[in-house]
Image (spheres, rainbow, N blue to C red):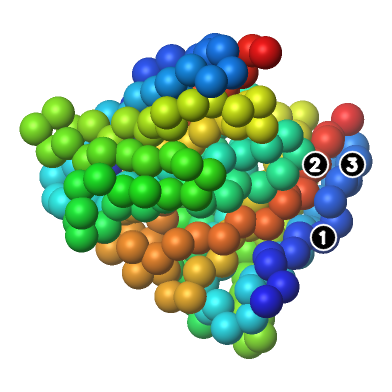
Amino acid sequence: AQSVTQLGSHVSVSEGALVLLRCNYSSSVPPYLFWYVQYPNQGLQLLLKYTSAATLVKGINGFEAEFKKSETSFHLTKPSAHMSDAAEYFCAVSDDGGFKTIFGAGTRLFVKA
Amino acid sequence: KAGVTQTPRYLIKTRGQQVTLSCSPISGHRSVSWYQQTPGQGLQFLFEYFSETQRNKGNFPGRFSGRQFSNSRSEMNVSTLELGDSALYLCASSSDRGYTDTQYFGPGTRLTVL
């Protein structure tokens, strides 16, 4: 069964600094991985998804993630944080054939001025 | 295209009551999934419907039920509400729900049980 672990429930960075949010997955089959962002009182918005076409995936708002099979990781990065990036980020894996998505616990990103 | 809409956005109920939440997917989407989000448990899968059929369900008690109509709109019902049912309920739609499909989420319904 698939599972997702996000390392760090809270991450704080300064504006302009690198953002790195960690995600490790467990899957017995090639996974399909997603990063979502949630702003306060809103639903989730897809940032990017990995579907095996390329290991480096570029998403919206300057975010990207690299799929590393050897490390079973799919970490999310952004070179320079903006205040508007402050939100909660969820890594997720799609259950193969089970018609459901399994989410990590989430990482709340704080951006300091 | 209009996004996923959920009604109502906020709801306050008391223990023992029942509640029905509604979700209208993006036009053309036939798959609707429901999730419960709480600070303690995070995002948990409730169930998924496709063309009026439930294809999968999560580990929730039978008090949680759902259905999908022929126009793909979906409702979920929670009977005999408990305090622990207080949560943000999110609905997501996708075109088919092949597991590479992107799910588009609505803003959620925040349910408070007193």
Q: Which residue is mark 3?
A: B13
Q: Which residue lies at the image location 73% right of the left edge and 34% below the top edge?
A: A40
Q: Is residue B112 above or below residue A52?
A: above
Instruction: Give residue B5's position: percent from left, percent from top.
Output: 74, 64
Instruction: Give residue B1's position: percent from left, percent from top.
Output: 67, 76
Q: Give whichever of discs 2 and 1 has the lower sequence position.
A: 1
Disc 3 versus disc 1: nearer the observer: 1
Q: Which residue lies at the image location 35% right of the left edge and 69% below the top edge?
A: B98
User: Is residue A111 found left or right of A75 in the rendered image?
Assistant: right
Instruction: Give residue A17's position: percent from left, percent from top.
Output: 48, 17
- Please say if the residues under marks 2 and 3 sit with CB atoms less than 8 Å apart: yes
Indicate the quadrant containing the C terminus of chain A: top left, top right, bottom left or bottom right.
Answer: top right
- Please say if the residues under marks 2 and 1 sit with CB atoms less than 8 Å apart: no
| Secondary element type, mark 2 | strand
Q: Which residue lies at the image location 33% right of the left edge and 62% below the top edge?
A: B99
Whole-number angstrom distance, CA of label 3 to CA of label 1 = 15 Å
User: Is residue B99 found left or right of B67 in the rendered image?
Assistant: left
Disc 2 versus disc 1: nearer the observer: 1
Q: Which residue is mark 1?
A: B7
Residue B111: image tag: 2
Residue B57: image tag: none
Q: Chain of mark 2?
A: B
